[in-house]
Amino acid sequence: MSKKKKSVQKEYVYCEPIPRSITQTLETNYMPYAMSVIMSRAIPEIDGLKPAHRKLLYTMYGMGLLRGRQKSANIVGATMKLNPHGDGAIYETMVRLTRGYEAMPHPFINSKGNFGKYYSRDMAYAASRYTEAGLAPICRELFDDIDKQTVDFVPNYDNSTTEPLLLPVTFPTILTTPNQGIAVGMASNICSFNLGEVCDTVIEYLKNPDHSFALTMPAPDFSTGGRILMNKSDIEQIYETGRGSVRIRAKYGIDEKSGSIIVTEIPYTTTIEAIIDKIVDLVKAGKLKEIADVKDMSDLSGLKIRIELKRGTDADKTMARLYKMTPLEDSFGCNFNILVGGVPRVMSVREIIDEWLAFRTECIKRRTYFSLGKAREKLHLLQGLQTILLDIDKAVKIVRETEHDDEVVPNLMIGFGIDEVQAEYIANIRLRHLNREYILKRVEEIEALNTEISQLEGVLADRKKQHKIIIEDLKRIKKQYPSERKSELVYDVEDIAEDIEEHVEDYAVTLFLSEQGYFKKITPQSLRMNSAQSFKDGDRLCQSFESSNAQELIFFTNMHCAYKTRVNEFDDTKASALGEYVPAKLSMEQDEAVVAMAATSDYSGYMVFFFENGRAAKVPVSAYRTQTNRKRLVGAYCDKFPLVRAVFIKEDCEFLLTASNNKALIVNTALIPVKTTKSTQGVIVFTQKGKNTLTDVKAAEESGIKNTDYYRTKAIPAVGHFLRDSDMEQPLQQNLFD
């Protein structure tokens, strides 16, 4: 029989909430977390390492991995004694430091197995049980004389062992190791520089404090290579402030057989997949019609992206467009935020080198103090040994005649006038070493020790000697670890970054704009088949003219704005179609409507704006040319008077102006002075008195006026003439913009 489970009734006790201010909560909960992230996780220190990097490398050093390799899983497990975070986080840190991952110009870990690639998000690294790792030879410079008290050691998280606060690096790893980190309220983004160039820079700086860093360290050097577009002001800003950006372009070649573009190096800030995805999106959107296909052909030999082009396409011009439209050209934003003495600081390159020199000098002094202490201890022992040289037999006699073991040292102290340390040393000398030859050799070391001590004391007392040691180390490192620059420097930026127009198929079209803002682009062939235009109910033709598919379009709106686009951005259509709605196409504001359009290939011609008060403004189309790729321009024309009509003209022509009092005036636009300011108020053309206003503007040849000479003026302003019925072929049409 099954036993029935007794139901347990839970009782809930209501507790009154404890009132607590938001400041108290932040101080007790948020601030400790924020400081932990800043101090112990995200921001590198002057040795160029974050705590996670330092713990991993020191563990590997303790495992003797300066020679040979071990399974990565073993290393991860051992590192957890210093780093209690998950094995996944530790292994990810290891991956980034490996040679196989290619994230660092000077990697610290030699790897065996699949460690993925930094420049690919899809090339995942293998599990730690399948890979092996060991320290690279350059790591000898990270742990130089670490056993000579060069740096402080602190207990690990559970007090089971100790770990170094910093590593006594012999070269400025802070400048040769790329570091990125996001803390609470701050971030760090340090680019890498070439090892040889950094060594040269520090050497020259020690010799000449006014040394210009750009002479020996012209620009960063990234592990993924690419071309750095040199801009003197940008580089100087980075060096002087620790902030700024570096423009990087991909490096490519052209397959002569197929005409395809082969990309072999990409900016450090992007990945293969991001580049390909962007190119595919642009091709689908019709903005890169000259590209037939794009493939990732990366293999063991290295990165390779193949961009196949359609027949007859200029590869260099296509690449110039890809630079503008894809991550094949990108910027590395520098933020040299470094922990110094537990305080995060954004530092210039000069300040970083000064701080590293102070740190390295302190390491040298501490090492010298340690060596000096050891030398003095040894000298003290040998000086005691020297005292028994004259009477070895006496020493033997004292030892032999002493009845108790604990009395040997005191008796030697009394017999030779030496201290306890010296007596202990002499008492522990083996019997076989009590020969004259052994003692004389030891005594000869005294002179060498005195010389060594004198040199060590000289190093401690003279900063120039300390700097000399640093210089010798840097010269040795540069020679021992040669490093060719991976990122090519391009100085002629203006020629490379020239404005390359989009490759657009050019052919004749006729453009139509309706009163309600519907746009059509129709080829001559289509017009010959059917020229009857269709519009929505209540809509009608506003403007039309012949153009080409490669020209730029400017739409003017009732909110005094101009929107720039291109003819090829609109699809070819038929006269029977309604067309594309321009306000929606160009993302205009609510209630914003198109009042005119202009098409140009060289920004020649004029826009003429006619206002109700009889004024007219003649603005060259070149005034709407912009250096940047701006789509919307505000203040495109004067906003002080109501607009009657805006007209695009390629050359001067005549217009019929009609007023509310039935007066008319024919004026040639040549009489209207050109104003380069877009929002100009223009000049008075048709004088209006009282409540009279200008109501209509149309081309003179389309006005239906028989006696045009009667209404034509030779000077402005003019008052015009009343329209006579005998001069009218047909009644004037209503203004399209009323």
Image (tube, rainbow, N blue to C red):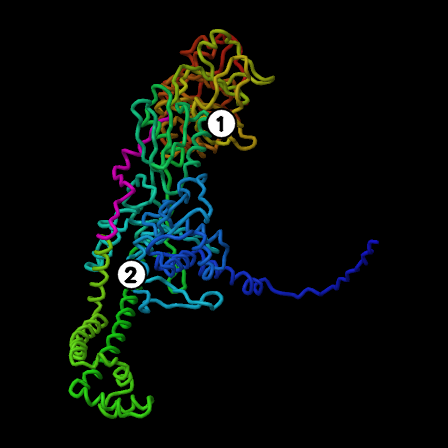
- Which percent across, then down, holds residue 718? 41, 21
Is residue 736 something that shows in the picture? Answer: no
Q: Quadrant of the C terminus?
A: top right
46 or 526, nearer to the observer: 46
In which quarter of the view is residue 148 placed? bottom left
Q: Amino acid at mark 2?
A: Asp
Q: Nearer the viewer, residue 44 or 581?
A: 44
Farthest right residue in view: 1
| Residue sitting at x 45%, y 29% | 280
Of the residues under marks 2 and 1, which one precedes in the sequence?
Answer: 2
The residue to which callout 2 is attached is 354
Q: Which residues are magenta?
A: 479-502
Image spot of residue 566 (x, y percent): 43, 24
Q: Position of residue 616 (x, y in %)?
A: 42, 26
Which element carries disc 2, helix, strand or loop?
Answer: helix
Task: Assign a secondary structure to mark 1.
Answer: strand
The label shown at residue 643 is 1
Name the amino acid type tagged 1.
Answer: Leu
Residue 251: image quadrant is: top left
Location of the N terminus (image quadrant): bottom right
Q: Is residue 332 among the parts visible in the rendering?
A: yes
Residue at 32% across / 49% down in the picture? 106
